[in-house]
Amino acid sequence: MDGAALHRSISCSPLACNRFLFSSPKLAPSFLPKSSVVAARRHHRLSNGSLSCRGLRRFSRLSAAPQSSSLRFGSRHFSSLSTRAVASPPTQPSPEIAGVQDEVAEKLGFEKVSEQFIGECKSKAVLFKHKKTGAEVMSVSNEDENKVFGIVFRTPPKDSTGIPHILEHSVLCGSRKYPLKEPFVELLKGSLHTFLNAFTYPDRTCYPVASTNTKDFYNLVDVYLDAVFFPKCIEDFQTFQQEGWHYELNNPSEDITYKGVVFNEMKGVYSQPDNILGRTAQQALFPDNTYGVDSGGDPNVIPNLTFEEFKEFHRKYYHPSNARIWFYGDDDPNERLRILSEYLNLFNESTAPEESKIAPQKLFSEPVRIVEKYPVGEGGDLKKRHMVCLNWLLSDKPLDLQTELELGFLDYLLLGTPASPLRKALLESGLGDAIVGGGIEDGLLQPQFSIGLKGVSEDDIQKVEELIMSTLEKLSAEGFDKYAVEASINTIEFSLRENNTGSFPRGLSLMLRSISKWIYDMDPFEPLKYEKPLMALKAKIAEEGSKAVFSPLIEKFILNNPHRVTIEMQPDPEKASCDEATEKEILEKVKASMTDEDLAELARATEELKLKQETPDPPEALRTVPSLSLHDIPKEPIQVPTEVGDISGVKVLQHDLFTNDVLYSEVVFDMSSLKQELLPLVPLFCQSLLEMGTKDLTFVQLNQLIGRKTGGISVYPFTSSMRGKENPCSQIIVRGKSMAGNAEDLFNLMNCVLQEVQFTDQQRFKQFVSQSKARMENRLRGSGHGIAAARMDAKLNVAGWISEQMGGISYLEFLQALEEKVDNNWNEISSSLEEIRKSLLSRKGCLVNMTGDGKTLANTEKFISKFLDLLPSHSPVETAIWNALLPSNSEAIVIPTQVNYVGRAANLYDTGYQLDGSAYVISKHISNTWLWDRVRVSGGAYGGFCDFDTHSGVFSFLSYRDPNLLKTLDVYNATGDFLRELEMDDDTLTKAIIGTIGDVDAYQLPDAKGYSSLLRYLLGITEEERQRRREEILSTSLKDFKEFADVIDAVKGKGVSVAVASPDDVEAANKERSNFFEVKKAL
């Protein structure tokens, strides 16, 4: 999902706004080679209800942080027209970086294969081989305190039973040294991790961890090594049942159902049309190798998996001989090898490396066409709900780094910005609503290219295919605009050198990049070194012209490539009910084949599994998991240097931090004078500023200019309640970054975007509406918990209502009505956009935030002064009255889906509750124990969690990809009793406190530190309050938990429920509890 859509959809939800008290929202990676963050469809554990791996193509963590809304680009007011708006090349080796002495490595059983200094990341990298097993280890040493470990196994499946995915979940459910139910959850509760997860690719499984605390880091490493090599799950059939699949029967008189965490996760995946399309495309492109099946698991096939096959897969592939191991950071490289030797020396060499090799797919001699159905709701014009996507396998073997880099640039030129010609041609054609297909995917053995449209009329399928081919033919014949090439070079080079991976650890980003070649027995160093191929590409473009570089690529890999698969997806309103009926029929046959004794035994086994799931681990087992003590925790919060000043009568915050010569800046405008009826237009207003032209520049020229001069500009709304205040904080934030030498260009471009863009392009605006509607529909299917959270918040506080108007069901309904209005009332809409601009743009209420080193900040002040002097000085009209709330009834938002998203919430401040820092510890503990055990483990949902928005007082419970509905609400309602009956020893309490501090002290890069400081300033959070909350967290006691029980009962007694759910489940719920939900049909 692109950044603009993300902000429109959730930037102000309770989940988004929660922990500004301490840290900033998570920042996503900017540009990274796709192999570092994408590998077709990946699956991974859900921790605390959030998908923890960033930047994935289809499973990304929800984030409230600003990301550049497709980097924007134009020719007035600018100091220089050179392309050199990028950081200087990396420095030479730092002599302080420690290494491993050869004799130490030999003594521990390793031999050094190769050692290189990687200038691009200022690191010494050494490749070792474990002599006894052949395990390979990359030990990367540098000054980065955010240490990373990862172990990766090549795990090619032979069918779609989901065996690699189920095993990835299961190995983290107890091991030889840590014999408890889920050490993974204990680490979530009580470590300072900056990353903790696991994920499954189509051909490999990764287990990465990260922490800035060395002791904590090695604790995490040890738990993960023991988990992968000595898991309990290969002897414990119940873990296989819990994480994979099992028949569930509570009473012999009832129906049998399927349960299992992965089973339900994949049911959710197979409910999303974009995911069905992506899976169909991959399997059709690779019919003859391991990519032709689904490593995540097809819900129709998962129940074919046996426990014996599961155990054998672990025995075969989870062996050191088949492992690639990565260490990164500022820890002792000798200690890394010592820890590894304790495990690796217990094994002998195996044949796994040969058995796990990935066979390449041979290229087709002619194209293939596939037609598939996907589930849609009834009603609406089904003829305009088709999807079509063209997919190419680009090569019959892996490509060299130079060709990959060139294809990466080609991909960005074709699709990377709204002005990119292929993206622009498709969206301006009017043939569909939104782009599908991710462009180039280079994370597997062979690269692919995919592009298409959704929201297509049945009669226009052929036209879309012809448009894609004719556009590519034209670009091959004519080449790309020189400014587009210049912008792409600057944008990609800026991002490579900036290396801003947000909250995703830099070392993990590098690991995934390295693994994309290393896993196929290729050079692990090469993907880390972009400098030489980048310089070669720039020189080639300068000498021969861009056409000589990119036209042959288009011709060879796409136009003249017969290995093309065209996927047509047809909407089928019967498919969801047919799939459910088929599953029910299978289960009825299973039950019919059983004797009374069999049924009684199944009911007993179901009860036994639930009892095990709900029985706490004994204290002695819990104590085996290593943890820190409170003495290891700093007593004061992390301070961000902040100087509050004044330029041209406007308040300016400055953060003097080392940023490698990059300037990060936010300009904030007050939104509180905006008329209530204009709020739903705000996200489209923000997009229009960046994707419409000015009097002198087309939107393409503006887009290109931003790309040539900056690292990107984005505009988005931010809304949050403010504790103790009646009116919410509601702002528009303009965010940009550039090299220090281009600061003048950055502020000139911000001014151009804000004041000179004209709202006159009716057809482009109509595209924005269609794209936004398609994105919202996709969110509804894939992130229903976010929709439910926003809806509940809108029933409970004004800030939530505002956010829901700009990113919830109300916004979707607004977009559906607006599509028609654009044709009939464009002048009115254009005038409304102009009215929004006039309400916002003023020096009064404006605030500027800057992050950079002292010299950069000082040099930038004159450009800020000029920018501010150009702003209107009038005061906006009086503050608008926004006092609307949605009705406080319980709602079911019905969509075609196989899983549900269930929420319940109440405002705790309305009960008289006064905020105490212990609430952070308690809510995290509820998520990691009660909800994890009852909603996920025994309930079978992919995730269950709670969130306390301490600004508004709204406490929310939410589930994710949940097979249940009322049962989950019952779990939420029993939370108060859980707290009253809670027994907790000192170790458990300490872990809960430490885990909370880990969230509070989340690792941040400099731009995130500056941004989080800005948000604290906007929300009135002082350093004194931060210190007080920290002290309250550190002094949390069992008494606090018990006292919170009465507070949380408000959710049961005075709460509202919202579920995004299937029609059948809602109908059953309303029969069981007479009309509990008011039904709202959304798709």
Image: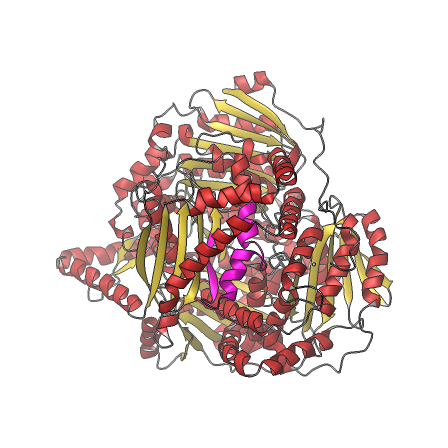
Task: Choose between 606 and 53: the one closer to the eye.
Answer: 53
Q: How is the image coloured?
A: secondary structure
Q: Position of residue 222 (x, y in %)?
A: 50, 36
Q: Position of residue 1027 (x, y in %)?
A: 72, 57
Considering only vertical position in the picture, is 392 above or below 750?
above
Q: Residue furthest front?
A: 477
The total of numbered circles placed on residues is: 0
Can see residue 424? yes
Task: Choose between 712 and 727: the one closer to the eye.
Answer: 712
Q: Is residue 430 one of those drawn in magenta?
A: yes
Magenta range: 409-438
Q: Quadrant of residue 219?
A: top right
Q: Is residue 327 left or right of residue 605?
A: right
Q: Position of residue 836 (x, y in %)?
A: 68, 76
Q: Position of residue 748 (x, y in %)?
A: 77, 60
Can see residue 448? no
Task: Choose between 968 and 358: the one closer to the eye.
Answer: 358
Task: Choose between 293 and 943: the one closer to the eye.
Answer: 293
Q: Quadrant of residue 446?
A: top left
